[in-house]
Amino acid sequence: MSEERLQKIIARSGLCSRRDADRMVAEGRVTVDGRVAETGEKVDPAKVHIKVDGKRIKAPETPRYLLLYKPRGVMTTCDDPEERKTVLDIVRPAIRERVYPVGRLDYNSEGLLILTNDGELASRVAHPRHGIVREYLVKIRGDLSRPEQQKVMAGAVIEGKHVKPLRIKRDSRGRGGTTTWWRIEVSEGRTHEVRELFFRAGHHVQRLRRTAIGPLRDDTLKPGEFRTLSEREVRSLRQGPSKTGKSSRSRSRTAAARQRGPRGRASSSKTKLE
């Protein structure tokens, strides 16, 4: 294995982003074979022992980038103390590398979720400062009045910060007209953000489905299925903020058709939007 910059090796180990690795090296928290590492130095990870805060990092694995349709009733964590099913239970044993979920998608929500072992890419997708847009379909009883739409768009204070969606639009009406589906885009991705926005407008969210992450969209994945991201999709995530839209739909659909493996399915997690 050839020499690489130290911060890149640390990021590839899945510990943190390259930016955070730079900071750790500068703070003297990284050692190479027992000596304090220098900023910008290159090493061969196969020939040296690299430690962060006294703990040796694992050798970088082959980068993996997965797109999973998370079903409802599955935890977006690597393990769960209550022994509930997690997203890692879905991708194992097909995926041997130590991947982890990027961002949040709560237990009762469903939809697209990225899993990777690339710490730098994970940070770019998850951190609000990078402005990656998430799109959701939201089902509520009844409809949103104009004042209620304005209240959703006004935002709310969540986790100590005022957040507001980028846009909201009615997508369709449910059977019998008693429910409606709304398409909403946000860039913060904070815990229960979408549910809280609708709740403060007077509506309980019945179903919540993430349909896009930046340029990524795949209408062919079913609950419990996953696939490998194409090189083009990974590059598009690295390039920065991306709005969702028709062009991103067609690009992701084409990429999905070309890049279908590996793929898995949860045995009893098929759902249909109603």
Image (cartoon, helix red, strand yellow):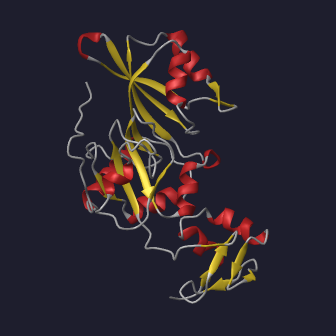
Foreground pick, 127 / 32: 32
In the rendered picture of this protein, how many numbered marks are placed on residues? 0
Q: 168 or 226, which is in the foreground?
A: 226
Residue at x 58% of width, y 16% of height: 151
Query: x, y percentage for residue 183?
Result: 42, 28
Residue 207 appears at what percent x and percent y? 37, 26
Q: Does residue 139 sit above or below 57 in this rendering?
A: above
Farthest-out residue, right: 27
In this rendering, does residue 251 appear at all?
no
Question: Residue 229 placed where, x, y %?
Answer: 37, 59
In-image side of 30 versus 149 (left or right): right
- Asked where in the image residue 211 lies, by quadrant, the reply is top left
Q: Position of residue 196 (x, y in %)?
A: 54, 24
Quarter of the figure that contains the C terminus: top left
Relative vertical location of residue 128 with respect to residue 6 in this rendering, above or below: above
Q: What residue is shown at x 50% (from left), y 88% (from top)?
A: 1
State the image quarter where residue 143 is shown.
top left
Nearer to me, 205 or 95: 95
Q: Is residue 89 visible?
A: yes
Q: Is 71 situated left or right of 16 in this image?
A: left
Q: Is residue 186 left or right of residue 76?
A: right
Which residue shows up at 24% across the image and 40% down it?
269
Compared to residue 159, the image places residue 237 above or below, namely: below
